[in-house]
Image: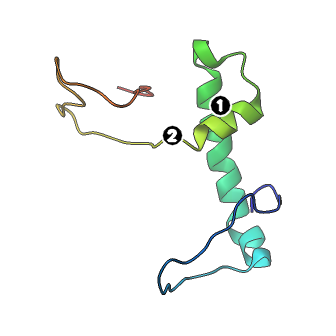
Amino acid sequence: MITNNARAANVICTQDCHFATVAKHDYDRVLRKIEVKVQNKMITFLQQLPYLKNWTKRMLLNFSYYLTVKTFPLGHYIFKEGESCDFIAIVKQG
């Protein structure tokens, strides 16, 4: 809903479902600004990474949909030497 584009996929219930919904005009009034701010913050961060510096904003936005922001407490092991790893970590701070 952020970009006002038509949906790019079908969503089909495979079992009985219950949803909470927000009308488009309410989303626009309340949530759109927050979502755009979050997206812009992520894009600004990604633009600072040397290996992504030539990417367009659209490319960075598309990439950002695959990212999961995680935080860890001081002293926490993200992974240990010798372990296999199935993700790439981009350290923002710390």
Q: Nearer the viewer, residue 42 or 81?
A: 81
Residue type, numbered disc 1: Thr
Quarter occupied by residue 2 = bottom right
Q: Nearer the viewer, residue 68 or 16?
A: 16
* Dot 1 crowding, Cα within 10 Å, few <14, some 14–19, many 20+: few
| Residue 78 position (above or below residue 39) | above
Q: Is residue 89 left or right of residue 55?
A: left
Mark sitting earlier along the chain (2/1): 1
Q: Is residue 21 left or right of residue 17?
A: right
Q: Residue furthest front?
A: 14
Residue 55, label in figure: none
Q: Residue furthest top?
A: 50
Residue 44, label in figure: 1
**Who's the residue at 67% across and 32% down the image?**
60
Quarter occupied by residue 66 = top right
**Nearer to us: label 2 or label 1:** 2
Residue 67, label in figure: 2
**Who's the residue at 70% across and 51% down the image?**
36
Between marks 2 and 1, how big is the CA–CA gap?
Answer: 14 Å
**Percent from the top left, x then y, of residue 48?**
61, 20
Residue type, numbered disc 2: Leu
SS category of the residue bearing label 2: loop
**Who's the residue at 70% across and 70% down the image?**
30
SS category of the residue bearing label 1: helix
The quadrant the C terminus occupies is top left
Quarter occupied by residue 85 = top left
**Percent from the top left, x then y, of residue 46?**
60, 27
* Dot 2 crowding, Cα within 10 Å, few <14, some 14–19, many 20+: few
Q: Are marks 2 and 1 in contact (CB under 8 Å)?
A: no
**Percent from the top left, x then y, of residue 62?**
67, 39
Q: Nearer the viewer, residue 38 or 87?
A: 87
